[in-house]
């Protein structure tokens, strides 16, 4: 997030980059809300921050995944790194507004690049504001190139409607230990067909272990055809009365479009079952056919950002892939 202090070098040199501590989680969540709210001119930006949490569950899974910036004993910024097999991304990267333009964001980026190098991933990315030269310039310094826009799409869910029943799905949470192992392997096989080494196992397990939502799985002849990992409710990345798709994809073949459409319907049904008033999902506009299907089913763009990627290549952001995902 925003990156103002005239004594830039001295201030950034005083910053300590380290892991976030457990007793700082509440403050870290507040900084995220404050930074985004300030940049987007949202009144009461930090009101009810507990309704939507972006860092806490990821810290509990692995504290090393949250980078903290400390200045004179005070927490001033954080960044979250996420690995999906051979692909990784970061964000939200946020700094207290009073320390924007001080070099703190660059210090956290240096640490982030070191983590990605240690992981040995083949591709990395981020989601940022498409209309902010400051953000685009910062990330470009670290080798990231702006590629396709990403549409954050939302559909209101009428909870009084009868659930959509024509698309039956199973949920990851209802499977036993052996079933979960089986479906994790099938999810890995499906995503590897979209990009070599792409693996959502950690995301699926995170949602399951901390009861943040569920992963919906659609089968054809007992074989996985599509899946979507969703969060819903307060204290998740969705927020109160909302459902949010972190990642969803259809098996890549001649029937991908049909399978993706079935997955959209399943996500709507799940949202109704969980009592959500809205369903949110991100679609990179490189997936133009997937985007068209989202529009067909009543989704509308509520926010536009841009995917920046390193190296300057598509990875799994290809027209032939039917994917909804969110790198925030």
Image (cartoon, rainbow, N blue to C red):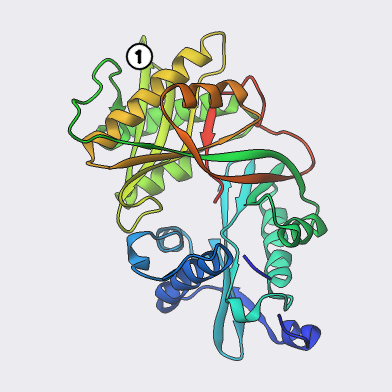
- Residue most extreme to the bottom: 72
Residue 314 screen position, x and y as percent: 72, 33
Relative placement, left or right, of 60 versus 2 is: left
Residue drawn 65% across the image and 68% down it = 2
Q: Position of residue 121 (x, y in %)?
A: 68, 45
Answer above or below: position of 224 versus 30.
above
Q: Residue at x 29, y 49 (%)?
A: 211
Q: Residue at x 37, y 67 (%)?
A: 49
Q: Is residue 289 or residue 207 the one in the foreground? A: 289
Q: Quadrant location of the N terminus?
A: bottom right
| Res 140 → quadrant | bottom right
Horizontal side, residue 123 vs residue 156: left or right: right
- Residue 230, image x and y in percent? 38, 40
Judging depth in this view, the residue of 70 and 51 nearest the camera is: 51
> Which residue is disc 1 drawn over?
222
Question: How many numbered marks are there?
Answer: 1
Residue drawn at x 25%, y 22% as measured from the top left: 164
Name above or below for residue 7 compared with residue 21: below
Tell me: residue 226, above or below residue 328: above
SS at mark 1 in the image: loop
Please give left or right for residue 4 compared with residue 201 in the image: right
Residue 75 place in picture, x, y as percent: 54, 81
Who is closer to the viewer here, 8 or 182?
8
In the rendered view, does 45 fall on the left or right side of 303? left
Q: Quadrant of residue 54?
A: bottom left
Mark 1, other Cα within 10 Å: few <14 / some 14–19 / many ≥20: few
328 relative to 53, above or below: above
């Amino acid at each position: 997030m925003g990156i103002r202090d005239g004594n830039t070098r001295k201030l950034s040199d005083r910053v300590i980059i380290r892991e976030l501590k457990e007793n700082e989680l509440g403050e870290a969540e507040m900084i995220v809300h404050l930074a985004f709210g300030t940049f987007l001119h949202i009144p009461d930006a930090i009101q009810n921050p507990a309704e939507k949490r972006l860092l806490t569950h990821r810290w509990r899974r692995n504290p090393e995944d949250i980078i903290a910036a400390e200045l004179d004993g005070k927490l001033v910024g954080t960044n979250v790194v996420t690995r999906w097999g051979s692909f990784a991304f970061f964000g939200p990267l946020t700094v207290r507004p009073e320390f924007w333009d001080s070099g703190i964001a660059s210090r956290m980026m240096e640490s982030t690049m070191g983590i990605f190098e240690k992981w040995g991933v083949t591709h990395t990315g981020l989601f940022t504001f498409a209309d902010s030269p400051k953000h685009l310039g910062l990330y470009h310094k670290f080798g990231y190139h702006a590629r396709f826009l990403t549409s954050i799409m939302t559909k209101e869910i009428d909870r009084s409607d009868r659930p959509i029943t024509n698309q039956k799905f199973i949920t990851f949470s209802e499977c036993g230990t052996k079933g979960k192992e089986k479906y994790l392997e099938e999810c890995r096989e499906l995503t590897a067909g979209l990009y070599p080494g792409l693996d959502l196992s950690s995301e699926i397990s995170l949602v399951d272990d901390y009861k943040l939502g569920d992963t919906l799985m659609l089968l054809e002849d007992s074989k996985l055809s599509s899946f979507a990992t969703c969060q819903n409710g307060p204290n998740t990345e969705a927020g109160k009365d909302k459902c949010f798709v972190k990642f969803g994809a259809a098996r890549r073949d001649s029937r991908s479009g049909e399978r993706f459409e079935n997955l959209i319907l399943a996500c709507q049904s799940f949202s109704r079952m969980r009592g959500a008033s809205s369903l949110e999902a991100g679609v990179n506009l490189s997936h133009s056919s997937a985007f068209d299907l989202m529009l067909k089913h009543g989704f509308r763009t509520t926010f536009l950002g841009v995917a920046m990627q390193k190296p300057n290549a598509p990875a799994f952001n290809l027209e032939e892939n039917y994917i909804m995902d969110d790198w925030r």
